[in-house]
Image: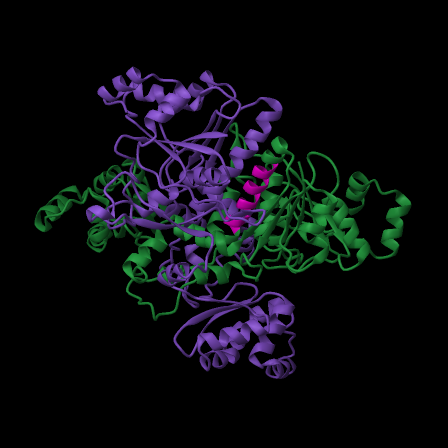
Chain colours: A purple, B green
């Protein structure tokens, strides 16, 4: 399948990336010189964006002057090109009449057009605004902070990433349907709806309504169960989880605290095998476990926790993750070379930049796929226009001369 | 298409929910009495789990004694039932030989089997441990906190939700492939890989490696651009974003600060039209804007920001979101009745519990779909076994008598 992507920032491009890594050919159309996110941070020393390159790898890059009618016509022709595996569009545009679904559908009635939006009524929104509006920052952060305290935003654009993968699922479902019925579809997907669906599907809106307000903040404790972070003797930290009775038993065994908790259960008349009791007594449980962690460095704690099959994980900084990647610890990660492979190489003194990026986390019959090559803005314009629209060399020359491509 | 789901907690069930809301028939198999997450918080006053009901709505529920060989045989028969639209499995099990891919594939060679894992080597992990291990909590939270300070976990199980939607995309891609080639697939998807892919695709690992450590924490400022939160006169808060030059211009216009920033640019020799300059001077920009927000209540600020087309959003608590839903503000949300519709209704004094849950955020040709009915554990067992495995009434009776179903 061949998908055309006219989208910037995280959500739309993540949709195209997901499909590209699943084997689709993705043709990304950018304005000449790149969109708003082409040089977005973080940047490599070469000035290239680690972000843009990683989210758009494995795609073909077409650059067109999208303000010119001739450029718009080219883009529309690519989007509506005939063929059973073509006619699939991801966009996130607002208010461009030439990309209106009706206009495109008139040229290809079975077009599958997935539009990423901010709000479902078309108003703009981004991850940081929708996250604020669904209430997640109000329940994030240190225990005891009441609701007049400043909210704590999460830094991960989680709703963008969820929206991006939803784009891929939606397009694949629509293609499945088109192959049976011949019908195209206009599918809209608002970031704000993704966030509302996310928190409501976890039961959080019902609970807040029942409670008449937000649940309290719990720091790094888990709501409704037992999980907490502990510091080790060497200044590292670990996250330890006991959702099930088996995990709780393993944690008591590893830390040699079974008898302490038996006595505590008797003294308080509680049964800590029940998840909600572990939640209610989370501070007490954590206080009893803390000295065990404080008395061991991470290596020692790690060995003992693993031996007892405790569900846990270390906290790592991202530089630690990159270092683990250098040791080959994470086969899902891969290095790609940034930018144009034709530019000056090490022999001329310029060191090519590379980027740590990822393969698809979906492993097919035991194997990860390739991550995809780093994109170079506009590198594939001539090739794509020749292949899909059958433009001739003189036609391409004319477009270049007129500054359309 | 018909998908069998043997999965608990968030990721696998989100995959099945996504597919069910896209039109698939999802048959969920639970152990008799329910899995570990059947009564997970938050709970309705009736004791039913808002969480389990919301994540499993719109699915058919089959309950089987999965410890008995006879029960395992039934589950395997459902998973490997013949038919071009069957033979699709989502699971997240570890170490159950009867659900090993080789065993299932022997019965249906073109089976599509998607297994959700913790780590790719099969070790368990959950959202809270993988998030710690990829470094997100280290860069979350108040500005100035250095890396020896406790990490700030996010409360949203973001990696679970991303993994869940990836399950749906992976299964649809595999079905698309099977329809062309006849080939099945064993697809593994580790939560840990999803998290590593997420942070590396944003360029964050490359940057941490280049920097030799974590980027500093920025509180509610956005890294690499300008976005920040402001308090209004009535004690509310808003999140304001200026990623593009146009958004920055709108923000200056709304707040009447254009001349202040002009003068500041001259005084400091900077150009705030550049995103990275807005990032570098974020504290100064925020300090200059703060009095404007402090001098207006939310309604007034809202009207003025919208008039100037500023990209912004209010912070809301989840109870506020639920209240907005009661006013009809969010068509993606819907109320479903929890539990068995056959149980005593209002006329007997028992008030049925309802739950605020969501339709698919993917709007098809302008319309949201139905959210799907609340599941009742085991309600569809007899029906599904009759329909798919053609069991007779005496056979069902025998299974009930032997406690298998």
Q: Is residue A329 above or below residue A181?
A: below
Q: Is residue B116 left or right of residue B230?
A: right
Based on the picture, tell me whether residue B168 belongs to the magenta stretch: yes
Q: For residue A253, what is the image quadrant?
A: bottom right
Residue farthest toward the left in the current orientation of the protein? B267
Residue at image x 56%, y 40%?
B359
Residue A60 in sight here: yes
Which quadrant: the C terminus of chain A? top left
Question: Depth check: A65 or B122 in front?
Answer: B122
Q: Is residue A77 left or right of residue B222?
A: right
- Rendering coords of residue B35 (x, y %): 68, 58
Q: Which residues are magenta?
A: B161-175
**How many labels sit on residues?**
0
Based on the picture, tell me whether residue A210 belongs to the magenta stretch: no
Residue at image x 27%, y 38%?
A342
Q: Is residue A273 above or below residue A319?
A: below
Question: Depth check: B100 or B13 in front?
Answer: B100
Residue at image x 49%, y 45%?
A369
């Amino acid at each position: 399948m061949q998908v055309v992507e006219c989208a910037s920032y995280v959500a739309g491009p993540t949709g195209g990336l997901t499909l590209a890594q699943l084997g689709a050919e993705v043709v990304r159309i950018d304005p000449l010189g790149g969109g708003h996110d082409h040089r977005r941070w973080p940047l490599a020393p070469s000035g290239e964006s680690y972000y843009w390159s990683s989210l758009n790898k494995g795609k073909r890059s077409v650059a067109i002057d999208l303000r010119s009618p001739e450029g718009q016509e080219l883009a529309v022709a690519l989007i509506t090109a005939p063929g059973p595996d073509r006619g699939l569009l991801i966009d996130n545009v607002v208010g461009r009449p030439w990309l209106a679904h009706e206009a495109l559908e008139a040229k290809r009635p079975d077009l599958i057009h997935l539009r990423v939006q901010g709000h479902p009524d078309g108003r703009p929104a981004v991850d940081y605004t929708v996250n604020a509006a669904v209430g997640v920052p109000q329940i994030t952060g240190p225990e005891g902070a009441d609701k007049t305290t400043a909210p704590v935003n999460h830094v991960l654009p989680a709703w963008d990433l969820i929206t991006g993968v939803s784009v891929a699922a939606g397009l694949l479902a629509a293609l499945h349907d088109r192959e049976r019925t011949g019908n195209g579809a206009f599918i809209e997907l608002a970031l704000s709806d993704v966030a509302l669906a996310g928190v409501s599907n976890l039961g959080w809106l019902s609970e807040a309504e029942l409670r008449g307000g937000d649940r309290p903040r719990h720091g790094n404790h888990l709501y409704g169960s037992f999980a907490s972070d502990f510091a080790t003797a060497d200044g590292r930290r670990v996250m330890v989880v006991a959702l099930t009775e088996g995990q709780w038993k393993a944690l008591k065994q590893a830390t040699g605290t079974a008898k302490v908790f038996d006595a505590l259960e008797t003294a308080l008349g509680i049964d800590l095998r029940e998840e909600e009791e572990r939640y209610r007594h989370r501070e007490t449980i954590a206080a009893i476990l803390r000295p065990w962690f404080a008395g061991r460095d991470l290596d020692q704690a790690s060995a003992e926790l693993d031996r007892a099959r405790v569900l846990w994980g270390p906290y790592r900084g991202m530089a630690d993750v990159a270092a683990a990647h250098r040791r080959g610890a994470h086969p899902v990660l891969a290095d790609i070379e940034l930018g144009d492979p034709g530019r000056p190489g090490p022999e001329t003194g310029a060191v090519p930049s590379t980027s740590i990026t990822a393969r698809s986390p979906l492993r097919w019959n035991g194997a990860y796929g390739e991550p995809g090559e780093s994109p170079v803005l506009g590198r594939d314009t001539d090739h794509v226009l020749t292949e899909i629209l059958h433009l001739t060399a003189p036609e391409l020359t004319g477009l270049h001369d007129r500054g359309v491509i």
